Amino acid sequence: MPGLAEWLDPHVEKYLLVSEQEYIVLEVHKHWSAAFFAWVRLAVAVPLFLSAWAFDPGLFWVFLVVAAVLGGQALYVIVDEFRDRFVITNQRVFRVHGTFSTQRASVPLGRILDITVKKPLVGRVFNFGHFVFESAAQVQGLSEVRYVSDIDQRDRILQETMQRAGLRATAPQLEEDGT
């Protein structure tokens, strides 16, 4: 019987173009900070729910409903962030996300014109950042991928993958005297 993590996994491998020998170079989960405030809301909802039984029926229902709404919304955000995946393959990059319905957006590596890496101050402290893609297709679903953990390493892997695919020109190395 599959576990909860297995059930929640979006199984990105089923979106590969196997007939074209596509394979996953890297599957990126979101950084834990993407769901931090949802975890805080869940941590508040649990004591509210448990303390509801200490009050008379009028306050009991208020505490119970507030805790259920707060906890339910927090769980939804946690699951939604867990299921959000950014995938680098040997042929394209794609993103799969969504909790009840799934959305996918992909861009072939050859269509990516520019990759910007944004690292806000808190991202520099906790080692995450955001990718901003500019592509020839201008695919809106993949224009920005937020909360990518270890963004510098992920960017290096993406650049190397694009280089191996022959999509980036390599300039000749200059000699010592600058010629």
Image (cartoon, rainbow, N blue to C red):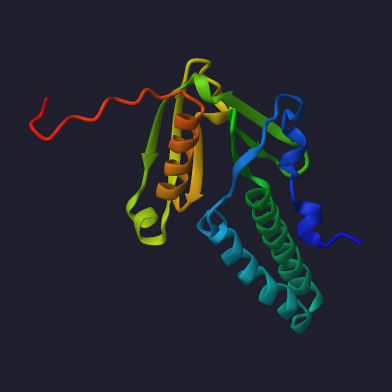
**Number of disc labels:** 0
Name of the residue lying farthest toward the left: 177
Residue that appears at 70% across and 33% down:
103
Residue 44: x, y in percent?
61, 70
Q: Is residue 72 left or right of residue 111?
A: right
Asked where in the image residue 131 lies, by quadrant, the reply is: top left
At 61% from the left and 27% from the top, the residue drawn is 106
* Left/right of residue 146 with respect to residue 62 in the rendered view: left
Q: Quadrant of the N terminus?
A: bottom right
Q: Residue 3 placed where, x, y %?
A: 83, 62
Query: Vertically, is 170 above or below 12?
Result: above
- Left or right of residue 125: residue 96: right
Along the line of sight, the residue nearer the viewer: 62 or 41: 41
Q: Residue furthest top?
A: 136
Q: Residue at x 57, y 66 (%)?
A: 40
Q: Position of residue 156 (x, y in %)?
A: 42, 43
Question: Residue at left 35%, top 49%?
Answer: 120
Q: Nearer the viewer, residue 48 or 46?
A: 46
